[in-house]
Image (tube, helix red, strand yellow):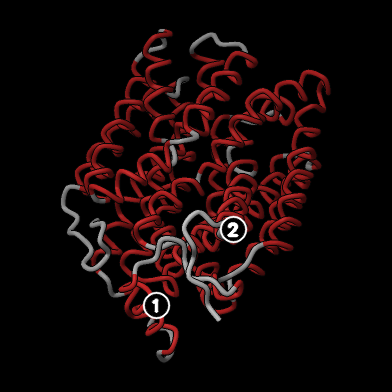
Amino acid sequence: MKQKQKNGSFHYGIIVLALIVFAVFSALGLARFGYTSILPAMQQGLGLTNTQTGQLQTLNLLGYLLAVVPAGMLASRFGPRIVIAVSLLVVAIAMAITGLVPAFEAACVGRILAGVGGAGANIPAMGLVSAWFGARRRGLASGIGVTGSSLALIITGPLVPAIIAAGGPAGWRLSWYVLGAMGLVVCALCAVFLRNRPEEKGLTPLGESTGEQERRNAEQTSAPLNWGTVYKSGMLWQCALIYFAFGFSYIIYATFFIGHLVRDASFTPAAAGMLWMQVGIVSLPSGFVWGSISDRFGRKFVLVCVFVLQALAFGLFGLSHALIPIYISAVLFALTAWSIPALMAALAGDRFGPRLAPAALGLMTTIFGIGQALGPWCAGALADATSSFSIAFVIAGAVALIIGAGGSLTIRSAKGSGSGC
């Protein structure tokens, strides 16, 4: 029998949310953003050009892109738990492979596998928010879920330079092994403790209203999944284009942040790593703060605000090498870093409900992934052509402002969600 949550009592959804944080921490934080910290030493160790370093990140994001739709569909069909656990295992193995590689071509294999596993874990994990939390808590819960990326920045910022310094020429390889081992621990936790739905614990979603419960019960007793509801939605494709702008712009900043500081702004690797850690610390509340604001004032309003702030962050980073603009840029990015993924996860739940939310998020993330895949490749090629990443950061800012903020202004509210779009 399903139990109505009592005020003040512990809800298993809190454990699920913690596991979502850990899944994001491994799938995106370690596998994707760990590369940012390891990149300078790895580039030197393998003798890579800037274009090749961008291509490695592009391949990681291409693997992510190829897997997002299958990940969402598999999670909707078979349940997120098994998909997340298997995918986290792939991520851990891929990080270990990246540390073993002798040359660029072999590194490509590790990076693309990490991307496939990252999508397989992240999409179902964020989709779980819609199953475990009602609309009034969904933005907040989604925002907490994406803090896994911040935790990874906090840990890898100081940890990777320390490992590299202690390990000498092979320090970057050792860093990948350590990150892979951390990923295995997360995989085991999710495999044992994660649950697909509150019903498995005899519960209802945390913060669910009576009207939401009635709609959810109707969905669960209805016929097969209506995929057309997802793929024919104009709002979904509009939001996907906006998500593209975020993917293209933020990944340029996140991938080459440390490399730009070391090469163009006269930072030492340790100092750049410490600033990256500080970005992680400040970014911790970004997802749930903006998610909570969106629960109250609507997703559209928050999307416009966030994109404007990120456009300023990217533009400042590219236009000046002075300390004050660099730190202002880092603060602006940190304050908004993971808000947009949280908002997109909440939007998917608002519009399509718990059962179809993973598939909707998967489709939106496919378009987002195209932006992510293009960003590092374009930025690396521009850096080789101009001997600087500055132009790439300015372009990232323009994309965030024009497509991101401008596109968000035209979004129509999602009916029946109670939060708007």
Establish if 277 lies above or below 31: above
* Residue drawn at (19%, 59%) of the image: 413
Q: Quadrant of residue 345?
A: bottom left
Q: Amino acid at mark 1?
A: Arg
Gap between marks 2 and 1, in whole Å?
A: 19 Å
What label does residue 371 carry, if any? none
What number is the disc on residue 216?
1
Residue 127 in sight: no
Place residue 159 in its image quadrant.
top right
Q: Residues within 10 Å of mark 2 (few under 14, many from 20)?
A: many
Q: Can you tell which quarter of the image residue 39 is in?
A: top right
Residue type indicated by callout 2: Val
Please identify the quadrant where the N terminus is shown.
bottom right
Q: Secondary structure at mark 2?
A: helix
Q: Residue at x 62, y 53 (%)?
A: 19
Q: Residue at x 40, y 8 (%)?
A: 322
Q: Looking at the image, which residue is at 39% across and 77% down?
A: 216
Q: Quadrant of the C terminus?
A: bottom left
Residue 160 in sight from this viewpoint:
yes
Name the mark on residue 16. 2
Left or right: 41, with 153 as reference point:
right
